[in-house]
Amino acid sequence: MENENLFDEQELDSTFPNNQKKPKKIFKPSILVIIIAFAISLSCILVGILYHPPIKYQTKSIKDYTEMRPLYHFTPEKNWMNDPNGPIYLASTKKYHLFYQYNPNKPIWGDIHWGHAISDDCMSWERLPIALSPTKDGPDREGCWSGSAFQDENGNVLFYYTGVTNQYSLPFNESQCIAIPINDSFLELEQYAGNPVISNPPFTDFTAFRDPFVFSYNSTNFSLILGSGRSSNSKANVLLYSSQDLFNWTFENILVQSPDNCSDTIWECPGLFPLEQTGKFILTISSLPRRQNTYYIGTYNQSLNSFIIESDQFLLDYGTYYAAKQFFDPTKNLYVLWGWVTEARSEEGQIEQGWAGVMGFPREIYAITNANYSEISVGFRPISQLQNFLYSEIDLGNISFNSTEENNLEFFTIKNFTSRQFEIKAIIEPKNTTEIGFRILWDLDSNEEFTDIVYYSQNSTLYIKRTNSTKLEDPEKFSQGGFVPLNENGIINILILVDHTIVEVYANEKYCITSRVYPISPKSEYISVFADNLAYVNNTIISKIKSTMPN
């Protein structure tokens, strides 16, 4: 909750409290007894100091530090969440549905079911009961893994997913299954009696065989693609199957194989969809072993079962963003992308926290082109519904810097705006700077906790620096980011979303960075703009964002 002091005032209790009641005196001790008792007490104190050193912020739980849960990003009520599955907008009910990989028992991976949530606007979500669970003795008895939703022209919906029978041993015994909604509330998905519909990989040396995505583009046939890899050549693959009835599938070919300049050995969670009116398609994949979401632009021909790569392999996000899944939103006539944002804490920290996993803020996908479509790239921006949840806007206008001291950062701090839940929009014009950016979640008093979003002009890179982002020891603190060139006007249009422990950055609507940070000081809520030389930060607007999730 905004500006609320969530810090427990009792957190600084001494390691050895001195408020215990003294025992009743029942005898008068001798000098020898006093000496022995003193020696024992001193030994206990020394052992306590050695093994339990005083900690500045010592509490029983992470919850005593501050509220760690994002409030306008989707999170599970408790326990573990990973990949988004089968997101869909159902026109008959005017509801958005989000399914996701879910462990109902622990905030760590395992025993995977499908969680479920619905929304009227893709912003405010209601968590619902588990929609899909493993079946005893079935092909999914040890897990209902990732998949997708397919809606035919009559509005009928089927869900496709990977079932597994050996979740803790390699190689996984994976097969492809169907779940059928009992009604249009999707509150319960029923396993198809004929599961699995695809039993085995087409070759014996496959190292993965999962995450079905079903589609049909200008064809009477249906297509299904799977993520895969092969041990014989260490190549990642997307497998292609076809069907005329959505239940009986035939292997066609390897649709795409990782090029020679690509080190990926397995591709997971594939998606293939058209890029507006360009005639091109986007192939999204989750790349192993590097665990990053990537994509290619190319030409897809469904009748010929072919996809020709016509671009470099691009990153969907430079940071912590994986297993992306898109869906078509007919209310906008465009595709929307979901992605899983992992915790950056230890397993012990996740257990202490009681929940794990955040969905990245949903992103609209669109084409950036020139007049004759000879140059095509992909744009990303937060869904437009976000604008309905902004409030307490502060327009800072244009901020100029002209520091004369070498390697000295000049700060412009916004003293009348404090928040952990906000948006920043600005235009960065670096001019003569080597560093320019924003300091957020800043404990201004102690200067011990803050996160920097920094543009380095000399090598045209943008990073989220997490070195001082938390006083906790277990979270990751390395920087995340990459190459972000200035646009043709020599500027960067930047949009920053901050939600307690997640930070998302959009640069020129083409480059994204997502990071997890864990500020624990209740005062880590200030914002500052900085630069080390002549520079401008123009059209700077900061707004708070309303909570859309139950706390």
Image: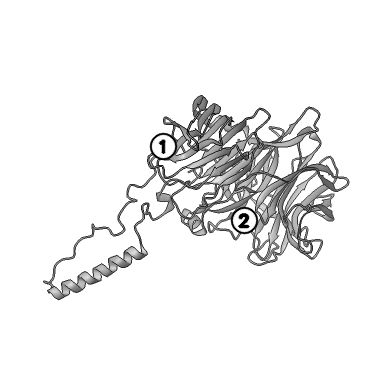
Frontmost residue, 46 versus 411: 411
- The residue carrying mark 1 is 3
> In the picture, residue 359 is in which quadrant?
top right
Q: Three-letter amino acid code at disc 1?
A: Asn
**Nearer to us in this view, 77 or 468:** 468
Q: Which residue is mark 2?
A: 113
Residue 250 in the image, given as x and y percentages of width and height = 84, 55
Q: How is the image coloured?
A: one colour
Count of marks placed on residues: 2
Which percent across, then down, holds residue 317?
64, 44
- Return the residue nearer the eye: 449 or 503: 449
Crowding at dot 2, Cα within 10 Å, few <14 / some 14-19 / many 20+, comes out as many
Secondary structure state at the residue bearing disc 2 = strand
* Residue 545 appears in the figure: no
Q: Nearer the viewer, mark 1 or mark 2?
A: 1
| Mark pair 1, 2: CA separation | 37 Å
Residue at left offset 51%, top offset 41%: 452
